[in-house]
Image (tube, rainbow, N blue to C red):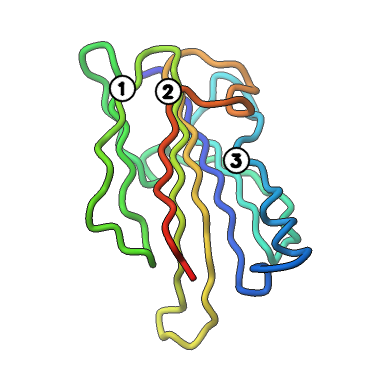
Amino acid sequence: MDVTVQLVRTVWTKRSRGGAAAARRNAVPVGFPLPQVPLDGAHIVWVAERHGFESRESRTDIGGIGVSLRERDGGLRVFAHNGFGVPLRPRRPPAVWLQPGKWLRRQLNHRSSSASGTADWSYSLDTFNIAYGPVERGVFLGEPTVQVDECGPVR
């Protein structure tokens, strides 16, 4: 399967919901250059308030990032799982079918607390960039072929 996957996860607390900190958070890119092509596994970019919204990169197995990928009839079926936290999403958009040479950007946001409920709320924005077929390192810097926005109110 010739698939390239990048997950950009931005995490913050209520301290970054307004002012200069919110401006820094909102300036986080939704796509980054790939470290290499072809990519072995998924490219993960973590951008967190606690690190001054500076990006930190790693790699992981594609199966561990919350998307299902399946090739069939010359296309790629992409489905993002529910994730965690609020807002609840009882109805999800259908899976996206990509043709070779096309790519998808799918965004989901979440609000969550600690398991015991004693910590402040934290917020996250997950951006999945998924390309089907050969790509260049800067593929996710441009506009996607397909964009799905599942962001909801997180208060």
Secondary structure category for the residue under label 2: strand
> First in sequence: mark 1 or mark 3?
3
Q: Tell me if 127 is positioned left or right of 32 in this view.
A: left
Q: Where residue 30 is drawn, which disc sits there? A: 3
Q: What residue type is labelled 1?
A: Leu
User: x and y percent of residue 31 in the render?
Assistant: 61, 36
Distance of label 2 from label 1 (alpha carbons): 9 Å
Q: How far apart are marks 1 and 3 (CA)?
A: 22 Å
Dot 2 and dot 3 residues touching (CB under 8 Å): no
Mark 1 residue element: strand
Which residue sits at x=65%, y=59%?
48
> Height in image: 120 above or below 107?
below
- Residue at image coords 49%, 34%: 129
Look at the image and tell me in which quarter the N terminus lies: top left
Does residue 64 lie above or below 38 as drawn? Answer: below
Residue 3's tag is: 2
Residue drawn at x 44%, y 33% is 147
- Circle 2/circle 1 CB separation < 8 Å: yes
120 over 95 or under it: above or below: below
Image depth: mark 1 or mark 3 in front: 3
Q: Which residue lies furthest to the bottom in this view?
A: 118
Query: Any mark on residue 60, and which?
Result: none
* Percent of width and height locating residue 101: 45, 12
Query: Mark 2 and mark 3: span between their CA atoms?
Result: 18 Å
Q: Report which residue position mark 1 lands on.
A: 76
